[in-house]
Image (cartoon, rainbow, N blue to C red):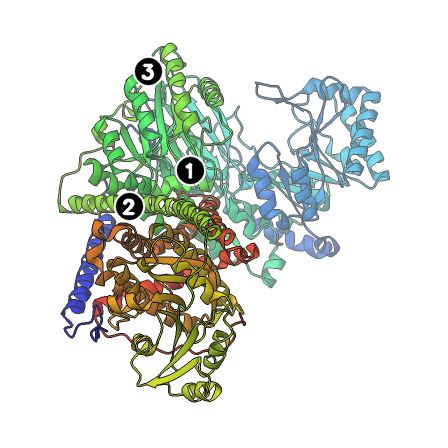
Amino acid sequence: MADHSRQVFQTDNATRYRTTQWTIRIVSAVLILILLIVGVAVYNGKNPLMPTMKSIGSSFKSKVDPSNTFTLATPLNKKFKGFKDFLNKRIAYEEKNRSVMDAKLIRSAFYVPWSPLSLQDLRTNGGKLNTIYPEWFFINPKTFQLDSRIDKEALSVMKHYGLSIQPILNNFISVPGKQGKFNADLLHTVLHDQKIQDQLIAQIITTLKANKLQGINIDFEEMNENSDEYLNAFMKNLYTQFKSSGLIVSIDVMADNSDYNIKYLKDYTDYFIIMAYDQFNDSSQAGPISDQKWIEKQLDQIAKDIPSEKLILGVGAYGRQWITDENGTHTEDITYSQAIDRAKISKSNIHFDDNSYNLHYMYNFSGSAYEFASKNDVWFTDAATAYNILRFSDDYRNAGTALWRLGSEDPRIWSFYGRDLSSKALAKQPFLYSILEMMPQNFNAKPTAIGSGEMINILYSPEQGRLKIETDKAENLIAGETYTQLPSGFLYEKFAEDSTKIGPGHKIILTFDDGPNAEFTPKILDILEREKVPATFFLIGENAEANIPLVQRINRDGFEIGNHTFTHGNLAKMSPERAALELKTTRSLIECITGKSTVLFRAPYNADSEPQTYEELEPLARSKKENYIAVGESIDPNDWDPKMTKDSIINRTIRFATQNNASIILLHDSGGDTRQPTVDALPAIIKYFKDKGCVFTTVADLMNVPETQLMPPVKRNWKNDLNFFFASASYWLGQIIYSLFLVGIFLSIGRMILMAVLAYLQTRKEKKLLADFKGIPDGLKVAVIVPAYNEEINASRTVDSLLKQDYRDLTVVFVDDGSKDKTFENVRKAFEGNPQVQVLTKPNGGKASALNYGISQANAEFVICIDADTQLKSDAVSKLMNSFYLEGNPQDVGAVAGNVKVGNEINMITKWQSIEYITSQNFDRRAFSLLNCITVVPGALGAFRRKAVIEAGGFTTDTLAEDCDLTMRLHKAGYIVANCNDAISYTEAPETIGQFLKQRFRWSFGILQSFWKHRDAIFRTKYKNFGKVALPNILLYQILLPFLAPLADLLLVVSLILSGLGLIVADPTHIILYYFIFSLVDIAGAALAFAFEKEDFRKLVWMIPQRLVYRQLMYYILFKSVRKAVKGEIQNWGVLNRTGNVKTA
């Protein structure tokens, strides 16, 4: 027999391995270098210039510097010594009224449900208050009954903070569609009709008790009574009934208002809230909200008749703007934030008036969006104003203060509003004025919007404000302050509005987000081109990279392109660096594909043209830093929603366009499972607006700028060329991998179906042949060759089981291959003198040499080769011999493969191997038997015609898969290799991962060697199905496709991680579902094999963990085998540790 001492792939020259190593290193280094270059180019890329636009911000033509002392021509502006004189006056009073001084201060505020900021403020700062006056109680103008408007959410917050809740009752009437007003006639009826009055008071008490509220605050304004008689009677009636119910009564008054008889009311009122604000209103000239001198006058005047413990000083925390235009002068009450925003956008200098302690600025305004110019005069209060007022009030020892109103104040007020600011308290715990010099960012403040339109330009983002405070340390007062940096919330302008009504000439812009998509974008483009309608496509970078030809088509056909981030992530939830990278990468991709840049941007998830929250505004602010213009929309039919149908998309688009008189329509050409409803709805949408006479146009036209300003051409340079090369390479690589995956899936499913059909046909054929089988000739001698190396545990048991075979003319040739343990001694001792057993030994030379030696010593026409750990069923030899004579000329059958099963299913790894033996090895041999292209007669159980083995050259040592190599040589010699599934043996599978990897590397490397050795036969008709089916099967399904499988699993894991992190647009459940379906197909194929083998289907449950772990081990083995083949080192069999756990056959 031939002696092949040199192994396939073996080489003494290291050139092959080193060449491969350096090739991989150089290619990897080049790719890394290219990635670095592209990364640097993207990061350092220059942003295109913003288009020249007429900004509303530029309409503030000039500001008026109010830095000179602002003096009002009033009697109050005489020599004023301020709080110093007043504070000295209070010292004597404090000593005489020590019990009053020790009373707990009321820190209260007015809550207005019509302002969302008021509720937000309450939630944040309610803990700094002890009393709240919510504007909840009104009088029904028709029935004169109580109209209670308690909002449960605010009530819950108030009770959470344990506040004394005293709703406001006023005579204000809300007029739908008009501005409401205080109504004197309504109040007149209540005051003069005793029955109505009693009924109203009873309803108030009932409502207060039902909601566990503590009292009432009376705010009657614009009264027109001839005397105070009826108001006095009402307050007495109210107070009397309230006292009997344990409820509090307070009333809002102004000292110089003659409607109130203060002296009389003091006996029927618990607290008087002095409205020490609104000093200058819309009927007077512009001036402070609450001049400190005026406050003292108000308080001094009312304190003559009312003890200070009944006085609550109202603190004005808001602003007022006097606007003078062609229609005269009118006012607008504004919040502190609005006052700051308007100063910021007009670039006005805020002046702290040290006479009034109020703040002031002026500016002129004119703009194309307005038909006239206006002069603006703004007065407002801030934390410094409030601090000085509280110092005044607390040293006056009033009962407390009431802030008008929650939501309009300077947030810095809350740094001191909850504490006592009297001189005595400050002596014990001084106030740290420096905390007022920093104004924190308020990301949740309501943004300020100016202008109109669906395009958005962020003017300012939230930033800290800085001030310089001047203090009077002797009196603990703030003497002056300078705003060095104005704080800002979000301030944005809306522009590019088409104010014409929906109809002739009205502009409509179609926009599509989330694309491109290989299936739906081409359909949309076809419709747009057919209808000759322009559109704007906001591309996701990763989708653009995956569909480069589509991006080129969008650009080539003249459509506008905008940036929709690279991964469709929420920019507000990203780090600033990540957000910038998303925008830069997508822009660079668009530039290298189209040769044009873009300044158009639409934020994922937040495209509304009325952004209100941080998550809606922050993406726009971040895009502005990269020179982007945000394109909003007011026509959003939510076509992305899976529930949306063609008709619902059409109807919603029309309805929103009509309601909002808007221009920009938001649709999607990608995202979700399907965009077909959008595609179906698009023609009808276009037809509707065309029939209305509307004009479909572009964003550039809506903005009235040249298209080149929105998509400026990019000069071609090496960076763009490199970006395009890299993007194209990535695109085509992705297409190739995707195509390979598809081909692999179809080939795998096709192979499974084909194998099932072949196995079924072979099974039917075997049944028919067995039905007609006459038996085998008598006297056919069979020798079972048992090679062994260090098999002392299993060897004797194996030989003993062979002697129990039901085949008569059988001998056992046991060949010890130079074992170092007691294998030879144990077997010789056990079977000494047995004529059926021949025990031989030889120097160690490997399994192939042991088999060849045994065959040479055997005196039989047929030899059966098994492993020393194999246990045969008692009829296995008989079944194998029958297969030689089952069909055709017996002399043509060179070998018969037996059915090997795992006999030691004791743990997870052995159970997995059992499934593999059934589904891959035995099932394949059953199918390939029909085509006579079995590639491995297993070493654990294989029968051979001795003449054929010798003719083929016997077992060789140039591969580690001597059984596979011999089988292939038998095919090439023209022999039939049959299969016998009924000849069953049980082998010992490795029980540890280490032993498993060792065995499977030997098999994998051996098959690789065998394939390479016989590669000359592939596709050659001379070798029939062995060359046309068997060898291609090994190449495709055992070498090439397994190299792609790790990529599939890797992509699954990476996709799940990236999807979970929001880095890619994909639904994790869909990814898992697809993988689950693929696994089900795998399990279905395994179930077929189990059915043929009549195995227990419950074993299939082990396939789930097997596919997750076992396959990864096989990948490792395959890569290791290829690496060893390239390296060219000689490989040895190695030794597997046996446990003897194989069950007895």
Query: Is label 2 in a helix, a strand or a loop?
Result: helix
> Which residue is tagged 2?
734
Toward the viewer: 90 or 341? 341
> How many numbered tags mark residues here?
3
The answer to whether residue 17 is above or below residue 640 is below
Where residue 206 appears, as percent x and y from the top left, is: 81, 33
Q: Residues within 10 Å of mark 3 (few under 14, many from 20)?
A: some
Query: Is label 1 in a helix, a strand or a loop?
Result: helix
Please tell me the numbered disc located at residue 571: none
Please tell me the numbered disc located at residue 695: 3
Instruction: Examine the image and state in which quarter residue 946 appears.
Output: bottom left
* Distance of label 3 from label 2 (alpha carbons): 40 Å
Identity, as a three-letter code, of the amino acid under mark 2 = Gly
- Whichever of labels 3 and 2 marks the residue nearer the N terminus, that label is 3
Identity, as a three-letter code, of the amino acid under mark 1 = Asp
Identity, as a three-letter code, of the amino acid under mark 3 = Val
Where residue 695 appears, as percent x and y from the top left, is: 32, 15
> Which residue is tagged 1?
341
Residue mark closest to the camera, 3 vs 2: 2
